[in-house]
Image (cartoon, rainbow, N blue to C red):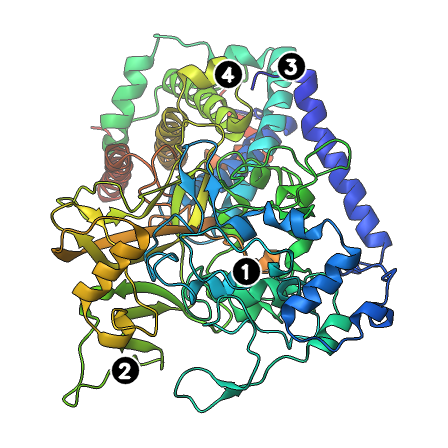
Amino acid sequence: MSRVMIYKRFERFWHWFQALLIFALLFTGFEIHGSYSVLGFGEAARLHTLAAWALIVLWLFAIFWHITTGEWRQYIPTKSGLFAVTHYYLIGTFTGAEHPYRKTTRAKHNPLQRLAYLFFKLMITPVIWLTGLLYLFYNDWPATLAGVLELETVALVHTAAAFAMLIFIIAHVYMATMGPKLTSLIKPMVTGYEDLEDTR
Amino acid sequence: MKRTAWKYLSVRFGRLAVHVALAGALICSGLSVYGAGRPPATADHSKFETLKGPFENAQAVTEACLGCHTEAGAQLRETTHWTWTYEHPETGQTLGKSEVINSYCGMAITNEPRCTSCHVGYGWEDMRQSPPTADNAVDCLVCHDTTGDYWKFPTLAGHPTDKPREWPKGSGKVVQPPDLQTIAQNVGASGRANCGSCHFYGGGGDGVKHGDLDSSLVDPPRTLDVHMSPEGLDFACADCHTSWGHKVAGSRYQVNAADTLGIDVPGHTDFSRASCQSCHGDSPHPQQKLNDHVDTLACQTCHVPEFARGGVPTKVWWDWSTAGRLDGEGQPITEYDEHGHPSYLSEKGDFRHGENVVPTYAWFDGTVKYTLVDEKLDVNHPPVEINRVEGSPDDPGSRIWPFKVMEGKQPYDTERETLLATHVFGADDTSLWSNFSWPKALQAGSEMSGMPFSGSYDFIETTMHWPITHMVPPAEMALDCASCHASNSRLAGLPGIYMPGHNGNIWLDRIGWLLVALTLAGVVLHGVMRIVLKGRKPS
């Protein structure tokens, strides 16, 4: 076993700041949607817009980081071991089985994680952003766009993507507790360090 | 709508720069608010020999005015204030007080000289004729008296009283003839009370007709009207309703529903300030998202949250069909509601009054179409729309406007299926208010208006739309977002708008929340099983 830096400083900052912003966006977003009334529509809309811009800026940095560090390769999907990991979460975890995946700094996400995060990054988030920006700049749509697209369609897709985001987060937060101990997987996301088995 | 990116940026941030500059200027000026301000007059009318009097009657004052203001009389005769007719450029209808029927006392033509007491002239006693043509028949004082003592007596076809008279009839209060000498020497620009002497009392009493115009606007607190309040800007009506050769801007028949000219700059625009945008422009809010609403909403929709807010109620329901009921001794009856407002008068039927009334909202392009007295009604589908506001969400010139919707029941000809003008006022044997007989009053109305009457009549429900634009409180009292962006939205039911917070798709919500609940349940179940089965070692 050796103690290695698995989540670098920027990665941790990105993760947690993104988490904060997404929670804020979900909370204000569902208020704007009319699900409840806490802040008031105007304040909710203002904070929602503010958090959205902050998240976009954060992502610009994150994309740059992923490209320059090559960390984007962590999300390339693989079939190898996918069945074993799925089997573990469905059955093995109850029978006391060991997690079948051995993470390394170059492959720190198990095959299921890779799929989930890739879906998050390439589907949920882009759809939310695209519809969100269309929503925000509704008044400035060029005539050609206004002729073919209804605000209602944009709003419904944005809402659907928000539900997907909420579901992702519930599952993600729960699965973060599924290490050997409740906090085993969360701690490295805070400190950056994890004890990994020597693979070489 | 198509914009280049550069133009877009320059517009968005250009506006921001303007707002920053404006905010800076405001701060530099010590956040002070200046009133409309009046330049000192160049003439002191008390020094004019010709105004020394004494005056035999009000026409004599007019003659004196016209001695210097040589064109004023002719100018005034050209205006709707004089002709009471209006050729609508869009609908081709001939409207105006002398033509339309309303849901209050019906038509002016069957009720002179009561109605013509608000004509800006003297002695229009027979509306089948044009207004009197004598030069001195124009009433200068009703608009230009600054003493407040000039009053056109309600039953004298525009004349003030020339001797002490009791008003209201039977009240014991006596109205003295005005001191024309003092009044003539104190003429000036029109103030709120001048315009208000007629426009606040339309429909037969204070606040009855419009809902956003009543005597509370003579001296309104800032919370009632931020522009007209002496605590605020102290605007006269004429500060917005600018005039040009006595023609006053702002029409209820052809409203400027979407002023896209923006701030009126001399030499560039139309010199009319009778729209909010004339002074405030079309992007007046510091928050861009609020400005994004101006292509859908009239300013008034958010900025006049309620009308009849000054303590004067407005009539919202008038059922003429119950008029004429008398007590056991054959005397007319008066009943009051719990607020002390009349709820029944034998002369007029049943009423409902409203204060702090939430407007009704509708798409409006500014054009108002009337159901004229000779138009055939769809009697099987009441209510009859006495007037109809045009506009639609697909029309770029339409905005959502607030309205007072006046409702009630009024007489119609059951055979000819037309509305009927009522002869309500007059010291004769046929007026409803003298003899409480509908057949006589309707027959007389028919003879006076020239509209046929078959003799059989009934009452039909009617509605009438009155655009709301006055009684603008300070901005902090404007509607908040959730007044519309909520499930119980003020704009509920209006076509062509998707409002976040109000609209949505019930199935998307059901499926979305179901999936969220299933995920949560799955997670909880999985977690519980982990705890229950904890410690089991693999065999």
Label 3 or label 1, whichever comes before in sequence order: 3
The chain holding disc 2 is B
Local crowd at mark 2 within 10 Å, few (<14), some, or many (≥20)?
some
Residue B348 visible (yes or no): no
Determine if marks 3 and 1 fall on one subunit: yes
Residue A32, image quadrant: top left
Q: Name the residue under label 2.
A: B334
Q: What residue type is labelled 3?
A: Thr
| CB contact under 8 Å: marks 3 and 4 | no
Q: Mark 3 points at which residue?
A: B4
Cα–Cα gap, marks 1 and 2: 31 Å
Q: Name the residue under label 1.
A: B471
Q: What residue type is labelled 4?
A: Ala
Q: Nearer the viewer, mark 3 or mark 1?
A: 1
Residue A172, image quadrant: top left
Name the residue nearer the viewer: B259 or B32: B259
Tag 3 secondary structure: loop
Which residue is at a point 64% across and 14% down the rendered structure image?
Answer: B4
- Give residue A2's mark: none
Residue B259: x, y in percent?
58, 36
